[in-house]
Image: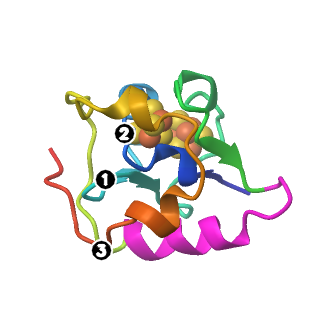
Amino acid sequence: MTYVVTEDCIKCKYMDCVEVCPVDCFYEGENMLVINPSECIDCGVCEPECPAEAILPDTENGLEKWLELNTQYSAEWPNITVKKDSPDDADAHKGEENKFEKYFSADAGEGD
Ligand code: SF4
Ligand code: F3S
């Protein structure tokens, strides 16, 4: 198993997660992060750290799409290990629905 970053991260990108991961397996897109499933050691430390509750174990139902997305984009986006400022409007997008359809960007972030 692995943990995956899901829709609730999009446009929130709080980045509390990157600070706690013992194996530095987060990768940065323009407006969300993903986890590399083959590097994640399933420690679960990041899950309660996310203010948007965007990180879930892939053992939960219905997360196949997010497992694929985390796998694909962690191979394309740069690694991130240090927390940066979240977007100014992060709180306004917290809990919003259909963020993937509205905002998902395949563009890479800057990384560390
Ligand atoms: Fe990193 Fe642990 Fe979260 Fe996996 S579960 S991404 S190893 S903090
Ligand atoms: Fe995203 Fe939550 Fe990390 S919003 S950047 S998964 S702390």
For the point 45% across and 76% down, the residue is 72
Neighbour tally class for label 3: few under 14, some 14-19, many 20 plus, Cα within 10 Å:
some
> CA–CA distance between discs 3 and 2?
18 Å
Tell me which amino acid carries mark 3: Glu
Q: Earlier in the sequence, mark 3 or mark 2?
A: 2
Where does label 3 land, which residue?
A: 76
Task: Find the magenta span and give its range.
Answer: 59-74
For the point 55% across and 43% down, the residue is 96
Figure quarter occupied by ligand 2: top left
Residue 17, picture quadrant: top left
Residue 22 in sight from this viewpoint:
no
Instruction: Return the x and y of residue 105 as percentages of the image width and height.
Output: 32, 68
> CA–CA distance between discs 1 and 2?
7 Å
The answer to whether the residues at label 3 and label 1 have Cβ atoms under 8 Å apart is no
Q: Can you say which quadrant of the picture contains the C terminus?
A: top left
On whether residue 64 falls in the magenta region, the answer is yes
Instruction: Return the x and y of residue 73 as percentages of the image width and height.
Output: 39, 71
Side of 76 relative to 12 (left or right): left
Q: Is residue 16 above or below residue 78?
A: above
Q: Secondary structure at mark 2?
A: loop
Tell me which amino acid carries mark 1: Asn
Where does label 2 land, which residue?
A: 13
